[in-house]
Image: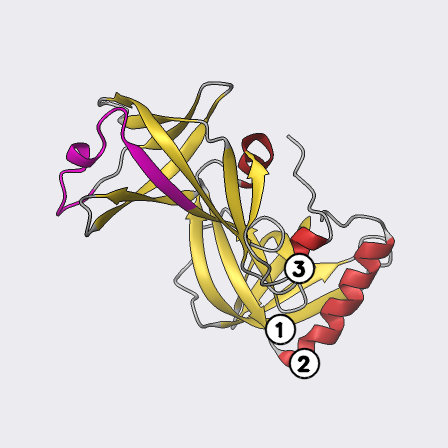
Amino acid sequence: MPIYQYSASEREPNSAPTRLTADKGLQLLPISTKVVFDICHSTESKVQLKSTYIGLQVNHALLFQFPKSKNIVCSSFLPEGNIINVKAVSTQGEGIILSFKTTILRLYPAPFPMLATSIPESIQLQLIRKEPRFNMDLAAKMRWETSDVNGEIEDISCNGCCFVTSELLDDLKNIEVNIIITDNTTMHSHNLHGIVKNIRKIKNNYHFGISFFDETKGSVQQLLQGFILKGARDF
């Protein structure tokens, strides 16, 4: 499925929320994205339940994992016909907060508990990054102390990148790392120095959010310039 491309006005950082039709907005909601259900419990309070987006039944419904909570009986807040607000953070492009209202159509019991909701008429988008990111899927190596691991750069900007690997690693949060990218055409290597800010597991892969140090941003700009000249910009 092709990724929806923003118009220039939609890419302005800190712009007002934008509304897209569901078919375009859902392209920015990858399967396995973590979501939050905002549910009106009474006129004075709301309940928030965490879930995961499973996928789309074309022209029919959105599917989510049934929420789990130690302190709340989730089923009491999720009857069929109830309207819920769904919020999610998409890491596509500039980074976006997605939000929309949807109606619960059906609850599926164990062994695969999930819920089906209506496809919304529109989805609200709010940009959360101040700069564009480039989708690359470029082979790379992450090195720290005396260890290294192979993986790929999922996306990159002047200030940071997302490094993805399937290998299970020790907790590297707040550890300094070097990301090494080699151009197979020129055999020139880019050594990008930064620090791991966050780690997420999505399916069978580990995603490392890395913030670059100032002294490495010149190398990042050279890399991105070459990437743009090759016409590979995704947004």
How many residues crowd mark 1 within 10 Å: few (<14), some (14–19), many (20+)? many
Disc sitting over residue 12 in the figure: 3
Q: Position of residue 93 (x, y in %)?
A: 63, 51
Q: Secondary structure at mark 3?
A: loop
Disc sitting over residue 215 in the figure: 2
Q: Position of residue 70 (x, y in %)?
A: 14, 46
**Gap in Å between the C-alphas at discs 3 and 2?**
27 Å
Q: Are marks 3 and 2 in contact (CB under 8 Å)?
A: no
Q: Secondary structure at mark 1?
A: strand
Quadrant hosting residue 148:
bottom right
The residue drawn where x is 70% and y is 74% is 217
Mark 3 vs mark 2: give the one in front. Answer: 3
The residue drawn where x is 57% and y is 66% is 143
- Name which of mark 2 and mark 1 comes first in the sequence: 1
Q: Are marks 2 and 1 in contact (CB under 8 Å)?
A: yes
Name the residue carrying label 1.
193
Q: Quadrant of the N terminus?
A: top right
Q: How is the image coloured?
A: secondary structure
Quadrant hosting residue 4:
top right
Residue range in magenta is: 69-87
The residue drawn where x is 44% and y is 38% is 32
Q: Amino acid at mark 2?
A: Glu
Q: Position of residue 102 (x, y in %)?
A: 38, 32
* In this rendering, position of residue 189 left or right of residue 94: right
How many residues crowd mark 2 within 10 Å: few (<14), some (14–19), many (20+)? few
Q: Amino acid at mark 1?
A: His
